[in-house]
Amino acid sequence: MADTLKGNRLRGGIRPSRKFGEGRVCAEKNCETRLSQYNRREYCFAHAPVRFPRVRGRVVPEGT
């Protein structure tokens, strides 16, 4: 059986999820939405600023 492969088990533990504090509330005025302790942002989904990811292409300098 020269065609078999043998490997080693991965060592080390699984890294725990980061936590950002409990009992946080959305930073928008008059919004009482509680944020998850795993949500790093300061706004809830309804009040988060719109962000558009750059998926490809190049960065065009402003004023062009």
Image (cartoon, helix red, strand yellow):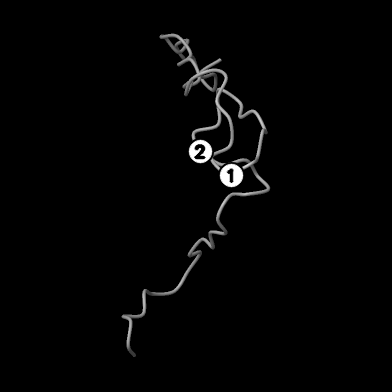
Name the one closer to the observer, 59 or 22.
22
Name the one closer to the observer, 32 or 21.
32
Assess disc 1: are there few (<14), some (14-19) or many (≥20) residues with their C-alpha within 10 Å of its C-alpha.
few
Q: Quadrant of the N terminus?
A: top right
Quadrant assignment, res 29: top right
**Residue 43 drawn at (x, y percent):** 56, 42
Residue found at x 65% / y 44%: 45
Amino acid at pointer 1: Lys
Question: Is the residue under label 2 in contact with that under label 1 (CB below 8 Å)?
Answer: no
As helix, strand or loop, the secondary structure at mark 2 comes to loop
**Residue 42 drawn at (x, y percent):** 51, 38
Tag in front: 1 or 2: 1
Amino acid at pointer 2: Glu
**On screen, residue 53 above or below 24:** below
**On screen, residue 19 above or below 32:** above
**Residue 11 drawn at (x, y percent):** 42, 9
**On screen, residue 46 above or below 55:** above
Residue at numbered disc 1: 29
**On screen, residue 17 above or below 27:** above
Q: Give the mark nearest the N terminus, 1 or 2.
A: 1
Quadrant assignment, res 37: top right
Residue at numbered disc 2: 42
Assess disc 2: are there few (<14), some (14-19) or many (≥20) residues with their C-alpha within 10 Å of its C-alpha.
some
Q: How many marks?
A: 2
**Residue 40 drawn at (x, y percent):** 49, 33
Quadrant assignment, res 63: bottom left
